[in-house]
Image: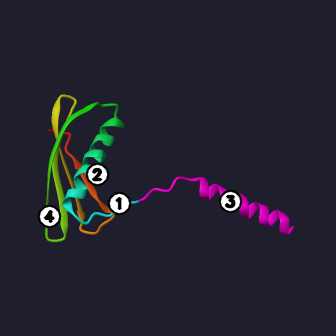
Amino acid sequence: MRLVLATAIFACSLQLAAQPHHHELEFSQASELLPWCEAEARAHFVGKGVTTYQWTGRYYDKGNVLFVEGKLRANGNDVPVACRVARGGRERYAIVEINEST
């Protein structure tokens, strides 16, 4: 009984160890948010099967909030992209807004 239990625990720990670990980003400066925002915007369009070109963006902060405003060329249009997160916030709390209606 003990051998079976020990084997089951060992097998579970091996499965957990084999899973890739995702290191979550924490943003302390607006410049750190810029490449993340671009990657998230491109991933949005890749998921739709749309090729993207010509990212341009700027970053700034207001108080404890970090901002990125950018544009990405997709489907022949310049698509506005905006990202924001609280200073010190993790990527799971960052907001990405993609305005495809323009």
Check if mark 1's residue and mark 2's residue have beta carbons within 8 Å.
yes
Decide: few, some or many residues near mark 4? Use Cα within 10 Å; few <14, some 14-19, many ≥20.
some
Residue at the far right in the pictured view: 1
Instruction: State which region is magenta.
Output: 1-23
Which disc number belongs to residue 36? 2
Q: CA distance from mark 1 to mark 2?
A: 9 Å
Q: Is residue 42 left or right of residue 31?
A: right
Is tag 2's residue or tag 3's residue first in the polypeptide sequence? 3
Looking at the rendered structure, the kind of residue marked 4 is: Asp
**Going from the N terminus, do you reach mark 1 or mark 4 first?**
1
Q: Secondary structure beneath disc 4? A: strand
Q: Which residue is mark 1?
A: 25
How far apart are labels 2 and 4 at the CA level? 16 Å
Residue 80, image x, y percentages: 16, 44
Q: How far separated are the C-alphas under marks 3 and 1? A: 28 Å
Q: Earlier in the sequence, mark 3 or mark 1?
A: 3
Q: Nearer the viewer, residue 48 or 84?
A: 84
Above or below, 89 relative to 51: below
Specify which label sits upstream in the sequence, 4 or 3: 3
Q: Quadrant of residue 54?
A: top left
Secondary structure state at the residue bearing disc 2: helix
Query: Can you identify the residue that label 3 sits on?
Result: 12
Q: Is residue 14 left or right of residue 40?
A: right
Q: Amino acid at mark 2?
A: Trp
Element type at mark 3 = helix
